[in-house]
Image (cartoon, rainbow, N blue to C red):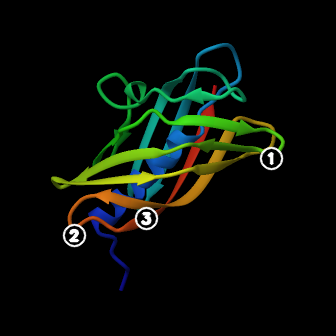
Amino acid sequence: MPRLISPHKVAGVLVGALTVAALSVGPASAAQSTVDGAIGAGDKSCSWTGGVTSDTAPNNLTVDRSTINSPGGNLSCSGLSAALNNDPAVTFDDAAGTATADALDVSVTVVGVTCRYRSGVLTAQRDGTTRKYSATADVPLAEGGFLCPASQTVSATLIFH
C-alpha cells in the first residue's frame, strides 16, 4: 500500500523549504538583483521569480520578503499558501561555495491550519561557480497546534540573477 503524506506534513516541508530558499539571495550584477526559487514535496510545490535583494552576491545582502510574498511578489503554491515573515540577511563565502542566512521565519497554511517555522543560521551550497544554490535543512516549528509537524527536513533550489 502506498504511503500517504498528510497535507500538514507537506505544508511543514514546504514552509521549511521556503525558509531555506530565502537564505541564499544574491545574483551577479549591480546594487539590486533578483532571486528565483523552487520548492517541492510530494505532489505539492511552491515557486517564485524576481525576488529582490538589497545587493548582489557575493556582497552581504538582504532579501525583501515583500517582493516574494503576494501581493507584491508572485509566490505560487499548489494546495497550500505560504509566506516569508522576515527579510533574511545573507552572507556569502565564495571560497567555500556557500551562502548563509542569519534567520528564517515562514508560515504555511493548509486547510485553514497555519504552522509557523523559524530557524537560526542556515547554509546552502553553490553549484560550481554559478549563483545556483541548493540546501536541505531541518526547520523547527515555532508556532502552531498539534496538527503542525514539530520540524521538517526541507529542500530548495535557488537561482540568482
Q: Residue 121 bears which disc, if any?
A: none
Q: Which amino acid does label 1 sit on?
A: Ala
Vertical placement of residue 124 versus 69, above or below: below
- Residue 97 in picture, x, y percent from top left: 77, 44
- Disc 1: which residue: 96
Quarter of the image that includes the C terminus:
top right
Q: Circle 3: is it few (<14), some (14-19), or many (20+) Cα within 10 Å?
A: many
Q: In which quarter of the image is residue 2?
A: bottom left
Q: Position of residue 105 (x, y in %)?
A: 40, 45
> Which residue matches tag 2?
146
Q: Is mark 3 on a helix, strand or loop?
A: strand
Q: Which residue is drawn at 46% across and 45% down?
A: 104
Question: CA–CA distance between discs 3 and 2?
Answer: 14 Å
Q: Reply above or below: 139 against 105.
A: below
- Callout 2 amino acid: Phe
Closest to the observer, 140 or 40 = 140
Mark positioned earlier in the residue sequence (1 or 2): 1
The reply, left or right, for residue 15 in relation to residue 8 is right
How far across and how far down the image is residue 30, in percent?
68, 13
How far is mark 1 from mark 2, CA to CA? Answer: 39 Å
Which of the numbered marks, if any, corresponds to residue 152? 3
Q: Which amino acid type is marked by label 3?
A: Gln
Say which residue appears at 49% left-offset and 45% top-offset: 103
Figure quadrant of the N terminus: bottom left
